[in-house]
Amino acid sequence: MSTATSLHQSRKRKNAVMMTLCVAAAGIGLAWLALILGALVYKGTAGLSFDVFTQMTPPPGDAGGLLNAIYGSVVMTIIAVIVGTPIGVLAGTYMAEYGRFSKLTTVVRFINDILLSAPSIIIGLFVYELMVRPMGHFSAIAGAVALAILVIPVVVRTTEDMLNLVPNALREAGTAIGAPRWVVIKSVAYRAALSGIVTGILLSIARISGETAPLLFTALNNQFWSSNLNAPMASLPVTIFQFALSPYEEWQQLAWTGALIITLTVLALSIFARSLTGRREDK
């Protein structure tokens, strides 16, 4: 009895030590996150005004806004999502529905994992060699293609995982009434996994919203308003990067404000994505 009690006490002490270390590690991580967000909110809100959303990026020493940079980011992000989402959804559908146990799926999954973890600057250099050098100039299209390549692996992984979670009994029920395979996928599997797939798309948007390196090699930047997709276009991440490194206080303030805008957008997308996941679990 004494041996069992001693062993129990020893396990309780070890559990208490590990619990303390885990809580301390979590607290340290949350403390740094709180400091970063606190500094961002404090410095970013100081320059937040209506002019930020209505005026162009200013020359050195003048006041201005981020309208052209916000517009460029929104345009390139929309194009990237429009291009990358169908490719990612179809690839994930093949891996989950048609080739779940095939060797091709194993290869595609391996390549997708590499793309998922690859530094974004590598994607930017790839698109630079693929599009920018042959075209002879930077362009918003090249920037959108770079962002689309970053969107694809996130959507592929999410689509495959969500479709794999759909019970096979639902597919069998659709097949039992004589529905073709593609109808079962469209009307049963997609409908059951819809919220998860949409969550993956939102997370991919959150990922590319703050990417700077790919756009430096593809879309570059533009100090003025430009809606020409075949020309350099301003974007919020690149503008923040350039303004933060400048010696001008007005530019530095706009960089803080732009960073706050991106952060709030990403947080909003993440919260919305989690709410969709929560609804799916409730169902």
Image (spheres, rainbow, N blue to C red):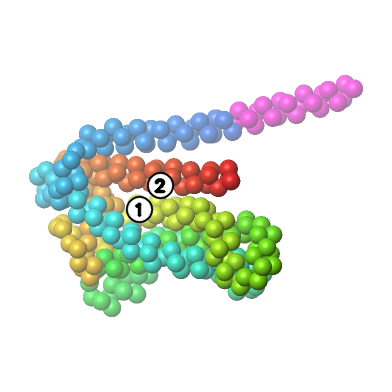
The mark nearer the N terminus, 2 or 1, is: 1
Which percent across, then down, holds residue 170? 65, 59
Residues marked 2 and 1 touching at CB (< 8 Å): yes
SS label for mark 1:
loop
**Residue 269: which numbered mark, if any?**
2
Taking the image as shown, residue 35 lies to the left or right of residue 250, namely right
Q: Which residue is mark 1?
A: 209
Q: Quadrant of residue 121?
A: bottom left
Region in magenta: 1-21
Nearest to the eye among marks 2 and 1: give it.
Answer: 2
Residue at image position (21%, 65%) is 232
Residue 27 shows in this picture: yes
Q: Nearer the viewer, residue 21 or 273?
A: 273
Q: Principal SS element in the magenta part?
A: helix
- Kind of residue sitting beneath label 1: Ser
Which percent across, then down, holds residue 118? 46, 61
SS label for mark 2:
helix
